[in-house]
Image: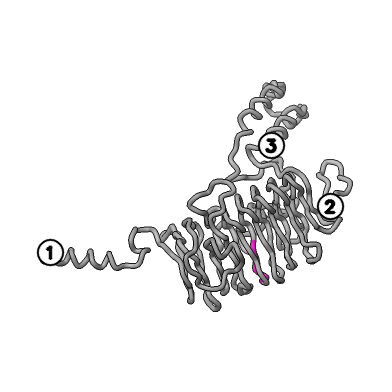
Amino acid sequence: MKKSIILALLAICASAPPFFQAFGEKTVSGVIDRETRWKAEEGPFIVDGDLIISKNANLVIAPGTKIVIKGGVKTKFLTKPFDRIDSSLFSIRVIGSINCVGKRSNPIIITPETTAYAEYSWRGLILDEADSRYTEVAFTEIYGASTAITVKNSNSLIRNNVLENSNIGILCTGGGMPKIYNNQITDCFTAGIKIDRSNPKIINNIIAFNNNAGLWCDGRSKITFRYNCVFGNIDRNFLDCEPDVGKLTKAVKGKDSTDAYGNIVADPTFVGSAAEAKAIEIDIMLQTDSTKVENKKILHLPNLQFGKIVLKELTVMGSENRQLSKYSPCINAGDSWMTFNNVDGSRNTMGPKGGPDVMSK
């Protein structure tokens, strides 16, 4: 009797769908055609083929969820490919809507199995005329895609994300007015943001240290681009943009120079960077007003020597988990409109750590 029960259980396990084969892990692909929820404790979710959220369907991804894109070449098409690259690489394509919203302290992670720089093993997240009323991508980290997020003819909200090690961070194409707020786009190859016949609102982002262009426009789209930090993009910070974007005005004493739209072209100064080490060295070399020093014994420490030690310790740092230094020019330098205020009510800080936890669409 016991033997027959065991054999029956083995038969059930053998015939079960792939996501039942390992506890705490789900393999997913195909078409989602209804309201679907992914919870962190059910993951990681292994995407081993095209995933399409069909029209009138909605995928809700909970904070802390990890999604791993399994490498491989397409063998069949569930629908007409979005573009040439989509015909060969897996993608998560949203024709309906997606609520991919993590938390500031518990982001959603979407990463390929292989995360080596410039190895793009998946097409990316494609918002293909996605329903703007219900689509939002926030507090999400996306790595290693051909294009991390593509927005076609949609007004979707894309905010507080970290987009790294992709070919393009965000591609806006085919119309629409997506809202792109407080993202950090770094270490991409071709461009941080590329505009093609679209009219996005791009506010309070950090677009830095990409291999070619920071912002690549098409010379005809009407975009809103204000209060962003654009710096260190190796080929150029701005390509085919209107002349006044990035053209710095005279700096006010004690503040970084900005262009006519409040954009700054200055090192965002991440924790552990050479820029932070230099700022620390300058800071500790400044003579402190003795009336503001409580412990007089530390007033005359050998600051320069200490500064060199700090520089040696802080210059080696990976590109992941970049955090703004207290010396960053991006702090409280974003759009002053109250809607963008930080959680504590202060003026917006550029990048994913700034802005409110919840923003209306």
Can the viewer see residue 21?
Answer: yes
Q: Which residue is mark 1?
A: 2
The alpha-carbon separation of the residues under discs 3 and 2 comes to 23 Å
Q: Secondary structure at mark 2?
A: loop
Q: Name the kind of residue labelled 1 in the image.
A: Lys
Pick the residue in front: 152 or 23: 152
Which quarter shows the C terminus?
Answer: bottom right
Query: Callout 2 environment at 10 Å: few (<14), some (14 to 19), or many (20+)?
Result: some
Measuring from the top left, give residue 120's x and y in whole percent: 56, 53
Locate residue 163: give its quadrant.
Answer: bottom right
The alpha-carbon separation of the residues under discs 1 and 2 comes to 77 Å
Q: Which residue is mark 3?
A: 276
Magenta run includes residue 157: yes
Q: Is 297 above or below relative to 176?
A: above
Query: Callout 1 environment at 10 Å: few (<14), some (14 to 19), or many (20+)?
Result: few
Is 105 displayed left or right of 23 in the figure?
A: right
The alpha-carbon separation of the residues under discs 1 and 3 comes to 67 Å
Q: Earlier in the sequence, mark 1 or mark 2?
A: 1
Q: Which residues are magenta?
A: 154-158
Q: Name the kind of residue labelled 2 in the image.
A: Asp
Q: Which residue is mark 2?
A: 259
Please name the residue shown 63% across and 64% down the image.
150
Is mark 1 in CB contact (under 8 Å) with mark 2?
no
Measuring from the top left, give residue 349's x and y in whole percent: 70, 52
Q: Secondary structure at mark 3?
A: helix
Identity of the residue furthest to the bottom in this view:
56
Please name the residue shown 59% across and 48% down the image.
118
Q: Is 177 above or below relative to 227?
A: below
Q: Secondary structure at mark 1?
A: helix
